[in-house]
Amino acid sequence: MSEKPYNEPRLALNRIYTRTGDAGETALVSGERVPKDDLRIECYGTVDELNSFIGLACQTAAELAPAAPAVGELCEILLRLQHELFNLGSILATMPEKIMPRQPRITEREISMLEAEIDRCTATLPALRSFVLPGGSRLNAELHVCRTVCRRAERLAVGLAREGGVDPLSVRYLNRLSDALFVYSRWANHLLGVPEVLWQPNRAASARR
């Protein structure tokens, strides 16, 4: 078996609070201490938030899978994304000049996988005739939450990239992931046999007599 490309975690989390952040600073993976409202912290903190919401959607999918086995594949995809987002967080939490050769990261392979899944899932879905709203199923709505949090993470990563503080692959991954999450949300309703909720402008209060 070939050697795994990334170092495995070497952690000993025996103590959760350290009091070292009480003054409003935190340490990066590469050792620097920065303010907790630093753009880099905001960026990988939002990636962490996204990971939590994907975990929620993954759990929902797992609970639906016994009655709708096809959803099991989506559950596996979401679990993979959680690991990839942790790899992304590792890179975002490290100053670019101090990234180690075998440090977990995002590569072209992760982006290509997302694109392949987008194409494959889209091929099974009806063409859109209107914008869709979150809903139809809880899983769909949760994936839309993931999509919007991913867009926020992407915006923050773009700002960080403008300062030369992030690998362009990280920005591309978040951009592609937000597209994928939109497709996964539609695919979830398709697998569950649930109609999509389409945007109807004339259902607004101002359009009603």
Image: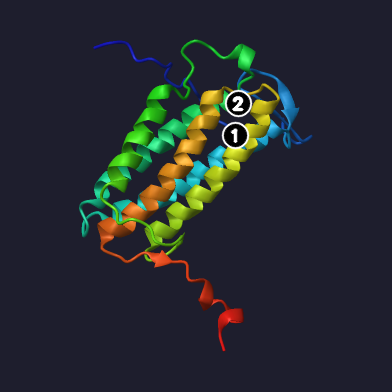
Secondary structure at badge 2 equals loop
The amino acid pointed to by label 2 is Ala
Using the image, determine if residue 6 lies above or below residue 85.
Answer: above
Q: Which secondary structure, mark 1?
A: helix
The residue identified by callout 1 is 44
Quadrant location, the N terminus: top left
**Label 2 neighbourhood size at 10 Å, few (<14), some (14-19), many (20+)?**
many
Q: Which residue is drawn at 62% across and 17% down?
A: 96
Residue at screen point 46% across, 60% down: 131
Q: Quadrant of residue 24?
A: top right
Placement of the C terminus among the 4 image quadrants: bottom right
Q: Can residue 61 be seen in this view?
A: yes
Q: Position of residue 48 (x, y in %)?
A: 54, 39
- Relative vertical location of residue 42 with respect to residue 127 in this rendering, above or below: above
Residue 93, disc: 2
Query: Percent x, y for residue 114?
Result: 38, 35
Q: How many labels does the image show?
A: 2
Task: State the image coordinates of residue 75 (x, y, percent, origin top left).
Answer: 31, 46
26 left or right of 116? right
Asked if the residue at tag 2 contacts the one at tag 1, i.e. Cβ–Cβ closer than 8 Å, the answer is yes
Residue 119 quadrant: top left
The residue located at (61%, 24%) in the rendering is: 166
Instruction: Tell me the kind of residue under disc 1.
Output: Tyr
User: Which residue: 67% across, 21% down?
Assistant: 164
Query: Can residue 17 be seen from the camera position used here?
Result: no
Where is residue 8 shown, x and y percent of the image?
42, 19
Which badge, 1 or 2, is on the more N-terminal residue? Answer: 1
Numbered tag placed on residue 127 in the rendering: none
